[in-house]
Amino acid sequence: MKYVWIEAPGIVGRFVPAGQAALPVADRGFTYGDGLFETMRVGGGVPLFLSRHLGRLAEGLRQIGFPPVPWDEAALRERCLRTTRENGIGEGVLRLTVTRGSGPRGFDPPEAAEPRLIIALTPRPPFAKGERETGGGVAAILAPWRVDPASPLCSVKHLSALDKVLARRLAREAGAGEALFQNLEGCLTEGAANNLFLVMGGQIVTPALRCGLLPGIARGLLLEAGEALPWPVIEAELPVASLARANEAFLTNAVSGPRPLVAVEGQPIGDGRPGKVTEAVEAWWERVCEEEIGNWRLGISG
Amino acid sequence: MKYVWIEAPGIVGRFVPAGQAALPVADRGFTYGDGLFETMRVGGGVPLFLSRHLGRLAEGLRQIGFPPVPWDEAALRERCLRTTRENGIGEGVLRLTVTRGSGPRGFDPPEAAEPRLIIALTPRPPFAKGERETGGGVAAILAPWRVDPASPLCSVKHLSALDKVLARRLAREAGAGEALFQNLEGCLTEGAANNLFLVMGGQIVTPALRCGLLPGIARGLLLEAGEALPWPVIEAELPVASLARANEAFLTNAVSGPRPLVAVEGQPIGDGRPGKVTEAVEAWWERVCEEEIGNWRLGISG
């Protein structure tokens, strides 16, 4: 990372050398986790699925009642592309953060908030199929607390992520790589940084949004895959006990793509090894990303 | 606010003019709400109940498995007092924040984290008894989502506070000043920035810690008040329906002290006006704070 884009109303947007990029201690993104972000895979020098990420961000800002931000989708798009180019990084992760901006003390969101925009790019080697955390697949724990689908935080990608940090810490302590959450009804929702898919009964099943989870970008693409995959991808309520009935499972996010989930709480999923369906989904993802990069080159996508 | 104290391992602590006080965009306090804070009332030029605040902070850092911070209680104490003096503010709010420090992308807490310390002081006029938000008392709503007492976030004062921000927004939209939370069992826990007390059956009753709430500093002092109050103060599980049976209710935090809670979701508590017990608790609080300021002057407290 060489340069970070920082912009706030009244402050002309500019690139700041990464080592000097800072935000005021009165920014509510820092004081109260009051903001949203997106993390995008950069491949072939372009931010993949940029329109989808910016669409989710706009919807999230609307959902949590943010004041109107002074950047429309075209403006954010332009800044993301400039940040990617300015850093000269072909493969990496682009993080775009919008905070409510500086504000007085107290939880009450100030009416006169002026949002702040921060865009940073972290290099990362190209994602290789089969790049897996532990001998062929990810193991997960179940986080020991439940989420309420009625919380407005479930469906937005927000800065108040300490619960995810602590869930990941528990996972690492247990020798696992992810923590899965469940809702008040005992239905699976998602991982700290991944959506969840179970392969069962000839279908690929993912928790429905009403269960309380982030509408992931890779998740959305999978649900729209249709004929591109030989199995239907559907949404459903998945009680925790579904894990014992799954033949395979996998996790997805827009940065890492699909990865096999082979065990939860020490119990293997299926035969405890990456399965054929997951392998096919990984290959499909590679194609989708290559197509996206190709479309960018043709100037017809993003 | 004139000066903010900023310190991180490898960076000599220093006062920075408030307008220039900033933290790196890679700080996890910003990227993931990964840190804790305390807000203290400054009165008579001293931070009140400083030892209690620092004790809660240390316990909170332990609870969420923070790496050891390089500042022991004496060091934090000294920095809080210096910040108060340096700013020359007699009445205000001192906020001390500890973040996990800068770290790489991803929720996993990095092993080599180096925490960052930020101490800022905001002026505020002296707190007057009877300083009330809406005609004699605070009205509250019930937040429309529930908290799980098993979450490690319930009992620590953390930066991931967007749920509190959004609850307060709903409260303000409803013309109220606070939002009360309930847990999975439908028992009251606390307000976004306040502990809750109900006066009923000749007792002052507050939700027990096991219900899932922050052990507030004013709450702790009330539970220890003993003979200083003519009513016993006890902890219990309080179903939401308890509100209808309360004669009075009040909210507390260490900055604002006790304030009458006169209505919840449009339903009056008791006769909908500040009650005698609450008034006595307000007077008790004034005495406790004056005594604390006096003890500071004698060099025997804090």
Image (cartoon, coloured by chain):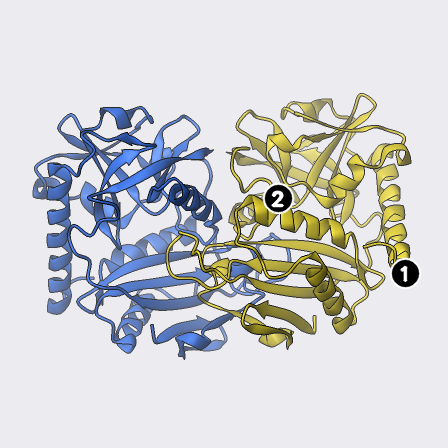
Chain colours: A blue, B yellow
Q: Where does the N terminus of chain B fall, quadrant-wise?
A: bottom right
The reply, left or right, for residue A115 in relation to residue B274 is: left
Location of residue A210 with respect to B33 vertically, above or below: above
The tally of labels here is: 2
Q: Where does the C terminus of chain B fall, quadrant-wise?
A: bottom right
Q: Residues within 10 Å of mark 2 (few under 14, many from 20)?
A: many
Q: Residues within 10 Å of mark 1 (few under 14, many from 20)?
A: some
Q: Amino acid at mark 2?
A: Ala
Q: Position of residue B155 (x, y in %)?
A: 60, 41
Q: Nearer the viewer, residue A272 or B269?
A: A272
Tell me the subunit letter for badge 1: B
Location of residue A146 with respect to B26 vertically, above or below: above
The reply, left or right, for residue B77 in relation to residue B61 is: right
Give the number of the disc on residue B192.
2
Residue positioned 66% across, 25% down in the render: B238
The reply, left or right, for residue B145 in relation to residue B121 is: left
The reply, left or right, for residue A142 in relation to residue B276 is: left
**In front: label 2 or label 1:** 1
Residue positioned 87% across, 47% down in the render: B288
Location of residue B21 with respect to B253 vertically, above or below: below
Give the number of the disc on residue B297.
1
Q: Nearer the viewer, residue B30 or B260?
A: B30
